[in-house]
Image (tube, rainbow, N blue to C red):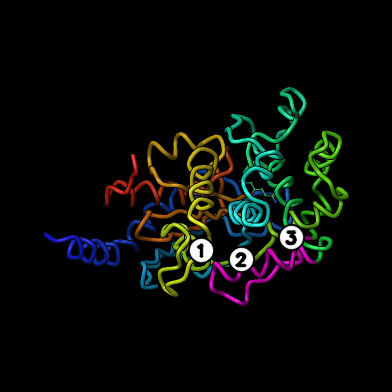
């Protein structure tokens, strides 16, 4: 059987089975809890699961509540990292953040004090992403936020992406821990700008509203090493996609990144709104959402569905 025939068979099989797999995985929503530490996120429904898988021509397989709108939250950190790399280059970025997983919670400040030189361990934990926000080029937070939004819209090929002001405000009002992290970073010489300005940028990029289709579209560009296969256009230098995918594999699912690599084996990034962005390199972009989270902060049903798919089609890279 030729490669193309195999691809077509997979696509047909996916189309036929996605609804039943979504229904099966949806049962796992009862094992999780919707995030509530950002009060606005607590309004999300507990029992939904949606997915969109996009191929290199833009065809999609969708299942469940794939039209549900949610905020990017930590998934945005992958793309601000890429923009910071494009703006500053590797040397500057890695003078401000490290390259290692922490084993601590995503909002931990433990290692900032314990481990010299007091820079965040990686760009996907909150401290690292706050440091990355400060590196986005722009004359003040307003311009930085505009550039980030333009970049996200460009990668998602969706000019309508906007910041959800209710989520932004809700996070800003309650982000006592992120504020402490940012002050720590300021003290340690990691942030050049005012703490409030940097946090404004960080909360804004976490609050961009998307659907599973937007995630799948953004992931498609990463799946093709920075080339958008639909517009046939390079969007991101290959090296920076390689860096992003490496962090997604080692830290993208926080303290469950090892477990996710064992069961799914694909680069991925989750967010506390329940989104997961992942990809089958060279083939598909994938976006999933299920707001009920496990103790590690990842969507219970989303992880279960991705495990089913990866095992059914032998998608693991390992
Ligand atoms: O900083 C926060 O707490 C949120 N804006 C983003 C956190 C997040 O999504 C972590 N994810 N699993």
The answer to whether the residue labelled 2 contacts the one labelled 1, judged by CB atoms less than 8 Å apart, is yes
Percent x, y of residue 106: 65, 39
**Residue drawn at x 66%, y 64% as measured from the top left:** 208
Classified by dominant secondary structure, the portion drawn in magenta counts as: helix
Q: Nearer the viewer, mark 2 or mark 3?
A: 2
Q: Residue furthest left?
A: 1
Q: Which residue is mark 2?
A: 152
Q: Which residue is mark 1?
A: 218
Could you say whether the residue bearing mark 3 is in a helix, strand or loop? helix
Q: Quadrant of residue 231?
A: bottom left
Magenta includes 165?
yes
Instruction: Name the foreground residue: 29 vs 159.
Output: 159
Q: CA distance from mark 1 to mark 3?
A: 18 Å
Query: Is the residue 90 above or below the residue 3 in the image?
Result: above
Q: Quadrant of residue 123?
A: top right
* Mark earlier in primary sequence (2, 3): 2
Judge left or right: residue 2 versus residue 214. left
Query: Is the residue 170 above or below the residue 252 in the image?
Result: below
Q: CA distance from mark 2 to mark 3?
A: 12 Å
Magenta region: which residues? 143-168
Q: CA distance from mark 2 to mark 1?
A: 8 Å
Find out if the beta carbon at label 2 lies less than 8 Å from the nearest ligand 1 atom. Answer: no
Residue 204's tag is 3
């Amino acid at each position: 059987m030729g490669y193309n025939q195999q691809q077509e068979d997979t696509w047909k099989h996916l189309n036929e089975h996605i609804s039943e797999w979504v229904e099966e995985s949806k049962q796992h929503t009862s094992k999780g809890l919707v995030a509530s530490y950002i009060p606005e996120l607590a309004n999300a429904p507990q029992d939904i699961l949606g997915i969109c898988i996009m191929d290199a021509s833009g065809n999609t397989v969708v299942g469940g509540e794939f039209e549900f709108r949610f905020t990017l939250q930590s998934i945005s950190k992958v793309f601000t990292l890429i923009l910071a790399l494009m703006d500053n280059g590797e040397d500057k970025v890695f003078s401000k953040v490290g390259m290692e997983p922490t084993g601590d919670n995503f909002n931990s400040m433990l290692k900032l004090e314990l481990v010299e030189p007091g820079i965040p361990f990686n760009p996907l934990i909150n401290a690292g992403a706050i440091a990355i926000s400060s590196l986005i080029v722009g004359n003040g937070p307003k311009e930085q936020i505009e550039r980030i939004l333009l970049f996200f819209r460009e990668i998602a090929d969706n000019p309508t992406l906007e910041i959800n002001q209710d989520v932004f405000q809700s996070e800003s009002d309650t982000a006592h821990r992120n504020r402490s992290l940012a002050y720590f970073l300021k003290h340690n010489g990691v942030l050049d700008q005012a703490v409030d300005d940097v946090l404004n940028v960080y909360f804004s990029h976490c609050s961009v509203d998307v659907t599973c289709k937007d995630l799948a579209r953004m992931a498609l560009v990463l799946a093709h090493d920075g080339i958008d296969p639909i517009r046939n256009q390079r969007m991101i230098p290959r090296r920076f996609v390689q860096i992003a995918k490496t962090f997604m594999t080692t830290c993208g699912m926080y303290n469950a990144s090892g477990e996710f690599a064992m069961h799914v084996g694909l680069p991925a990034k989750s967010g506390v709104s329940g989104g997961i962005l992942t990809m089958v390199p060279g083939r598909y972009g994938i976006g999933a959402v299920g707001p009920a989270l496990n103790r590690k902060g990842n969507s219970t049903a989303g992880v279960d569905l991705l495990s089913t798919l990866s095992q059914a089609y032998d998608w693991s890279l390992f």
